[in-house]
Amino acid sequence: MKARVTVTLKTGVLDPQGKAIEGALHSLGIEGVASVRQGKVFDIEVEGSDPEAAKVALAAASEKLLANTVVENYRVEIL
Amino acid sequence: MKAAIVLFPGSNREGDAARALRQAGADTSIVWHDDPDLPDRTDLVVLPGGFSYGDYLRCGAIAGRAKVMDAVRAHAARGGYVLGICNGFQILCESGLLPGVLMRNRDLRFVCKRQFLRVERNDTVFTRAYARHQAIDVAIAHGEGNYEAHDETIRALEDQGRIAFRYCDAEGIVGGDANPNGSTHDIAGIYSEKFNVLGMMPHPENLIDPLVGGIDGRGLFESLVAA
């Protein structure tokens, strides 16, 4: 079973990397980019076939390691 | 004073920390991150600077969950002293021993230079050899030193007097251009609630020898050894 955990910065947290990427996109002449926030994606192969159990396990994984919940949100998807 | 310096894969300031501690009169030993225990009668645990686990995931994130950190948490809970410098500060935040997080520097640059800090209080085991509000000349070398925390956490740190050091200029004027990384309230280091854990981004261990141009870092280690 494939799962994906997406970690994003919380609203209001300064994201200098996102700002730099935003600036680079503007300098490349790409139109219509209002703002960029950078995050992380984890593609995870989960053993077993119970999607609810996988969601619980990956939420724990996110809380304990994948995200720093002081500044980051996370989302777990079973693909 | 028995000091245990924890070595993670990617630590690189353990030798500097050991030298500063020995100069101040401490016995030092190196503890591997995978050890479940600290040496008997350890008074002080030092998490040195470096790039543990290559800064993968987030700075200090993987080291903060290393086996030895359970022993470090137990040591801190018993009132034992813990000092985290640079990557060690990041590890303390990731391990839950200190609140908040160290984010990328405001201007995205790795900053490596001499830096003045204002000693916020001199009644802790880490700072007794300094004067209150003394501006000390040490060094910084980091890309992620921009301290951030929830507003209520920052308020609690301020109200409880848990800011250890703030970035300042040579005259001790805090903030403005003297803040090298955008850190909230110019915070360079913070204490735990019981003041036995200190995390700081700057490197006092690199300014202990006149050969490198200054000895303002000595006070921190001399304070600890006298504790």
Image (cartoon, coloured by chain):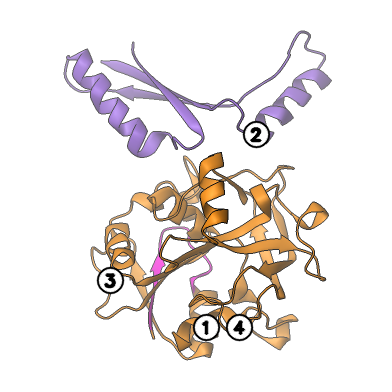
Marks 2 & 4 on one chain: no
Q: Chain of mark 4?
A: B
Query: Which element is circle 2 on?
Result: loop
Give me the C-alpha separation between circle 2 and circle 4: 35 Å
The kind of residue on which mark 2 rests is: Leu
First of labels 4, 3 by sequence position = 3
Q: Chain of mark 2?
A: A
| Mark 3 residue crowding within 10 angstroms, few (<14) / some (14–19) / many (20+) | many
Q: Which mark is residue B218?
A: 4
Query: Which element is circle 4 on?
Result: helix
Give me the C-alpha separation between circle 4 and circle 1: 9 Å
Marks 4 & 1 on one chain: yes
From the top left corner, tell me how far across and down residue B146 is, in percent.
63, 48
From the top left corner, tell me how far across and down residue A47 is, in percent.
20, 23
Whether the residues at callouts 4 and 3 have beta carbons within 8 Å, the answer is no
| Mark 4 residue crowding within 10 angstroms, few (<14) / some (14–19) / many (20+) | many
Res. B203 image quadrant: bottom right
From the top left corner, tell me how far across and down residue B53 is, in percent.
45, 51
Q: Which mark is residue B38?
A: 3
Whether the residues at callouts 1 and 2 have beta carbons within 8 Å, the answer is no
Q: Which residue is mark 1?
A: B223
Rendered colour, chain B: orange
Res. B6 image quadrant: bottom left
Disc 3 versus disc 1: nearer the observer: 1
The kind of residue on which mark 1 rests is: Ser
| Mark 1 residue crowding within 10 angstroms, few (<14) / some (14–19) / many (20+) | some
Whether the residues at callouts 2 and 3 have beta carbons within 8 Å, the answer is no
Query: Residue sitting at 27 percent across and 63 percent down?
Result: B74
Q: Which residues are magenta?
A: B2-14
Q: Identify the residue at the far front of this view.
A: B159
The kind of residue on which mark 4 rests is: Arg
Q: Which residue is mark 2?
A: A14
